[in-house]
Image (spheres, rainbow, N blue to C red):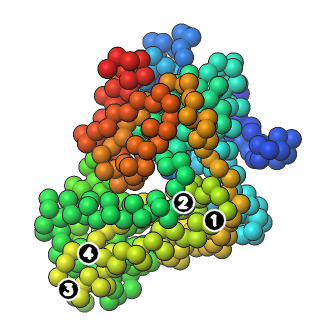
């Protein structure tokens, strides 16, 4: 039974759905999905068209908004919105170290998790749509990985879509994970250069922290083993609009004087565990590289292997000279399953996923080439998380897709620029700009 309640300016309804774990076996095992319906209070009784929001990730549940901030307020002017927790995230049969042992050992867990990619998410959406809209097509808003899912939607079930809006989420249609990361590390280097140009004092701060971590063992309060490579992954902050500033503030008070000499402060350690722990989103670490698997080649810890081609990211080597230590981000490494207590029980499962050779295609270039669904996409110039060149190539491969390429926002533009970003993309859909 659905439960409705109110927040300022909105009416919310909790919705739950039952879908097959494996859509090729619709009579087999099922899982439960959760979504939150949102409608403006003054439009609650109106027959509005539906907008489905697919969150970025993979591995993150939908936003838990209060009221109608960011893009949501703009969407609610004309849509009834469904905020879906994609399978394995949020309240949708979460997949983590606590729940996965129900499946059995690592082989059974890895086999289970192969069903948690974009193709399964799209088929979930199609079952949900028929129940929610009575069969009418809806508009999808895909942020980041949600945009990847939207391109899969256009490939697998375009009849379910009235329109698609993508923000920072146009994937390469055929790149292997190795291609993705070979493009990513140079972007990371550029983001580092921009940060150090803005905050030159951070060069010495980062070097000092990295040197400390190479000399001493540091275990954070939650049991996370803070190593130099783990510290370097803070570079993920540089992909957000305020990320460079947040990183600077985090670094400025890293050390505190103690009777035993300088130590990393409790406040800094608390911040670090909040940024580094995968406890709230372990699926991100488990299937992140699998979202690029589309053929018989294993992903095989691609980000770790490709990083070896970029020795400038080796902190120990950098510290033998006087250059800046480069930070990384948007990469998953096998050592994370040793350093993070939320991931340690899943190390063997992750290894099996990295070795899989039976990935199936997530996109259909032939179908996309004759696409008839109106599509608009925001592409952020030099996006840290999604390669701009890959996105533009894909944009040209999807018939009728209209792009807005901008350097006004970073990857989180739909949050930071919310109403303006969504307004611009909806206008593109309607040929108003």
Q: In this view, does 189 lie above or below 6?
A: below
Distance between mark 4 and mark 3 Cα atoms: 10 Å
Image quadrant assignment for residue 188 = bottom left
* Of callouts 1 and 2, the N-terminal one: 2
- Helix, strand, or loop for circle 1? loop
Mark 1 or 4: the one toward you: 1
- Helix, strand, or loop for circle 4? loop
Residues 4 and 423: in front is 423
* Of callouts 3 and 1, the N-terminal one: 1
Distance between mark 1 and mark 4 Cα atoms: 33 Å
Q: Position of residue 139 (x, y in %)?
A: 53, 25
Callout 4: few (<14), some (14-19), or many (20+) C-alpha neighbours within 10 Å? many
For disc 2, the marked residue is 176
Q: Where is residue 56 in the image (x, y as percent from the top left)?
A: 48, 45
Residue 297: mark in rendering: 1
Residue 427 falls left or right of residue 191: right
Mark 4 or 2: the one toward you: 2
Residue 325: mark in rendering: 4
Callout 1: few (<14), some (14-19), or many (20+) C-alpha neighbours within 10 Å? some
Q: Position of residue 346 (x, y in %)?
A: 63, 69
Q: Which residue is drawn at 66% across and 36% down?
A: 156
For disc 3, the marked residue is 321
């Amino acid at each position: 039974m659905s439960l409705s309640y109110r927040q300022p300016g909105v009416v919310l309804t909790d919705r739950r759905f039952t879908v097959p774990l494996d859509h090729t076996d619709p009579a087999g095992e099922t899982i439960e999905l959760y979504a939150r319906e949102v409608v403006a209070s003054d439009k609650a009784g109106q027959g509005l068209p539906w907008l489905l929001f697919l969150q970025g990730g993979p591995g993150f549940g939908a936003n838990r908004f209060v009221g109608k901030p960011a893009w949501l307020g703009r969407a609610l002017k004309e849509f009834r919105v469904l905020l879906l927790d994609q399978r394995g995230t949020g309240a949708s049969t979460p997949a983590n170290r606590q729940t996965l042992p129900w499946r059995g050992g690592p082989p059974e867990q890895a086999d289970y998790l192969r069903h948690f990619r974009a193709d399964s998410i799209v088929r979930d959406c199609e079952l949900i749509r028929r129940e929610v809209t009575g069969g009418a097509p809806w508009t999808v808003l895909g942020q980041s990985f949600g945009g990847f899912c939207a391109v899969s939607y256009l490939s697998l079930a375009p009849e379910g879509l009235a329109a698609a809006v993508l923000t920072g989420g146009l994937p390469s249609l055929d790149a292997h994970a190795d291609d993705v990361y070979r493009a990513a590390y140079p972007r990371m280097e550029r983001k580092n250069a921009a940060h150090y140009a803005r905050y030159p004092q951070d060069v010495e701060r980062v070097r000092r922290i990295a040197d400390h971590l190479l000399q001493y063992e540091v275990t954070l309060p939650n049991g996370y083993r803070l190593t130099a490579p783990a510290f370097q992954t803070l570079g993920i902050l540089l992909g957000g609009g305020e990320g460079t500033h947040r990183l600077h503030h985090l670094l400025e008070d890293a050390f505190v004087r103690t009777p035993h000499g300088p130590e990393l402060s409790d406040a800094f350690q608390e911040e670090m565990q909040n940024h580094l722990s995968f406890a709230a989103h372990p699926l991100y670490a488990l299937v992140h590289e699998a979202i690029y698997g589309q053929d018989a080649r294993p992903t095989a810890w691609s980000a770790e292997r490709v990083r070896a081609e970029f020795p400038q990211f080796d902190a120990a080597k950098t510290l033998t000279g006087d250059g800046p230590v480069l930070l990384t981000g948007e990469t998953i490494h096998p050592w994370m399953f040793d350093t993070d207590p939320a991931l340690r029980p899943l190390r063997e499962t992750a290894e099996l996923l990295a070795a899989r050779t039976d990935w199936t295609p997530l996109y259909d270039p032939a179908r996309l080439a004759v696409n008839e669904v109106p599509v608009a996409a925001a592409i952020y110039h030099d996006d840290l998380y999604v390669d701009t060149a890959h996105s533009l190539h894909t944009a040209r491969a999807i018939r009728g897709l209209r792009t807005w390429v901008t350097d006004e926002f970073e990857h989180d533009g739909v949050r930071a620029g919310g109403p303006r970003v969504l307004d611009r993309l909806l206008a593109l859909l309607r040929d108003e700009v």
